Image: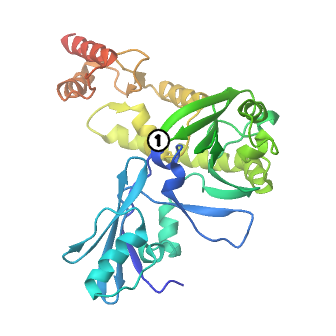
Amino acid sequence: MSKYKAMLLLQGKLVQTLHFGPYAKNWWISCLTHDLTYTFLYPVCLSMKTITIVNHRDFIITVVQNNFEPRYICQSEALQSNICRSLSEAITSIYQQAFFTKTRLDGLLVMGYCDSEICKMLLSSIYFHSYTITTGSLNLTIFGIGKSNNPNWNYARKGYRSSFVHNFRKTRLIFFQEFNNKEAIVRIYQNFQEIQTFCDTNPNSIWNKIGILTQFTGSILFGLEHEWMKSKISKELTLLCTKKYQYVYKMKKNFINWKNQESNIIELTTKLQEIYPPDYTIEDCELHVWKTLLQYTGCTNRTPFGKESTFEFWTQSKDPTNNQAMLKQLYENRYFSTENHESDAAILECISGCLRC
């Protein structure tokens, strides 16, 4: 049990590009488990804020962002730290100023990462609990999971993501591995830039192309041969069915709220983001089911522009004139940015045309 009592003031948010992208490892903290075959990870949420009493004095720690990495600020009464690279650096700098001491504090303990309740809250909106496994000398981090019928992928699918750090051409680089609908992909990053991408039908073929770590198969480097990973994938189908039932229930509540709201219009992508966790990948077939359900219940796609936009507006109104007020609001507030985007300019013109109808 930690000697500090931390309280979560603000949970913060998970960001797809930070917590589930190539630099995701920076945004997760490892905690010891009783099983040595894997280590669970807990998110460092952007804008997360905790307060902890240390030596009868309040210390507030806030998570901020610097490029693709987290940074930390500690505040206590009138004292505030610089933007620090580590939790321990932030809390220690202020503690030493406050008490004129050279004592160093453990930032993870002070911020509450050993508090089971705080860790539970941080995981509350996460579909898959990320973890690390060891393969030879490599520490492989798994950020996503999915189950398919493809034996060449060890039954993983789009949504599965893993990464590790290793030397490549005399430089230490990040290898980020994932699947799309048809291929396995390895992206190589250096200094926050993608420098090379390899694609093929399966992980083994990709790593044959890359030509390093030849003592391992591609499936092992993806993390797909690890026994615990295989058991998680095999259980994923049952878990997925349970989760999707919960999502349908949430969507039902959204339908009720939609019916009672003043406007008849919703933006479909935004609504789906409200019911799915931020790390969940919505498959095309699943999106098609939602659209079919909307059509079956009498809703209509009123999006006044083409497929180049990610926005999709649906209405439950049978009279399209009822939607003009909402379209006008979108247009006047320039909901779609037109800076250097010809397609967005076309979208605005389409909306303008709708308003003139």
Whole-percent x, y for residue 121 in the image: 48, 65
The crowd level at tag 1 (other Cα within 10 Å; few <14, some 14-19, many 20+) is few
Q: What residue do we see at 23% from left, 11% from top?
A: 353
Residue appearing at x 41%, y 68% in the figure? 87
Q: Is residue 325 above or below residue 138?
A: above
Q: Position of residue 49 (x, y in %)?
A: 35, 66
Q: Quadrant of the N terminus?
A: bottom right
Per the image, the residue denoted by label 1 is 192
The residue lying toward the viewer, choosing from 35 and 333, is 35
Quarter of image, res 210: top right
Q: At 22% from the left edge and 10% from the top edge, which residue is drawn?
A: 357
Q: Could you say where residue 186 lies in the image, as x and y percent from the top left?
A: 64, 35
Quarter of the view holding residue 4? bottom left
Q: Left of 95 or right of it: where is 189?
A: right
Above or below residue 90? Residue 125 is: above
Q: Is residue 205 left or right of residue 73?
A: right
* Left or right position of 157 against 329: right
Residue 94 versus residue 333 in the image, above or below = below
Q: How is the image coloured?
A: rainbow
